[in-house]
Amino acid sequence: MTDEERSTTTSEETSTETTSSTQEVRTTTIGEPVEIKNGLRMTVSNPRLVDSYTINGEEVTPKKGNVLGILTFKLQNTNESAQALPSMEAPSVRTEEGKYGLITGVGEKWEMFTSTDIDPVSSKSMKGVFEVPKSARYSGGLAVQLSYSISGEKRTIRWKR
């Protein structure tokens, strides 16, 4: 990508990159809320790696050499009226080794989480579970990525450690 195709603005906590395909990419740190639209904010927090996790009463264990990454996704509506979320893709975890999606059983919960309106001045949260290599624990490039669209414009948020 050339300098003409990308412009970067940096502040203390967040950087924004706009590409030639009009995709906005915002980068911030895990734990920091990011405004999605009109007082609707999302925060990714509480990252941890575990050897097993219970989903719907069933214990889930990763393949040999992997661990489960658990993150909390919180949506907060600060407006006085209910808000619908924009069209969102499922989040992914990216490490130096690759890209990892939500594990089976959690993807369906994500769809329910993002398909219902958020009541006025309220919040809701859910756990995201990803299977990642054990080496992700030491990965300096660990990031959580979420893409969504508003008025046909694709936007991406990356939360990094």
Image (cartoon, rainbow, N blue to C red):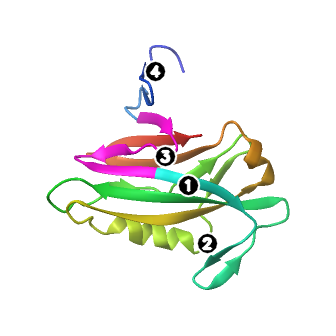
Tell me which label, 2 or 4, sits earlier in the chain.
4
For image coordinates 25% across by 45% down, the residue present is: 151
Say what secondary structure mark 1 lies in.
strand
Name the image quarter holding residue 123: bottom left
Q: Mark 2 points at which residue?
A: 104
Q: In this view, does 76 lie above or below 6?
A: below
Q: Distance between the residues labelled 1 and 2?
A: 21 Å
Tell me which label, 2 or 3, sits earlier in the chain.
3
Q: Which amino acid does label 1 sit on?
A: Asn
For image coordinates 49% across by 14% down, the residue present is: 3
Residue 151: say if magenta.
no
Q: Name the residue under label 3.
A: 31
Whole-percent x and y of residue 65? 84, 59
Q: Which amino acid does label 2 sit on?
A: Thr
Mark closer to the observer (1, 2): 1
Neighbour tally class for label 3: few under 14, some 14-19, many 20 plus, Cα within 10 Å: some
Q: How far apart are marks 1 and 3 (CA)?
A: 7 Å
Tell me which label, 1 or 4, sits earlier in the chain.
4
Q: Name the residue under label 4.
A: 6
Q: Which amino acid does label 4 sit on?
A: Arg
* Chain part drawn in magenta: 24-43
Q: In this view, does 98 lie to the left or right of 31?
A: right
Whole-percent x and y of residue 62? 76, 67
Whole-percent x and y of residue 15? 44, 28
For image coordinates 23% across by 66% down, the residue present is: 119
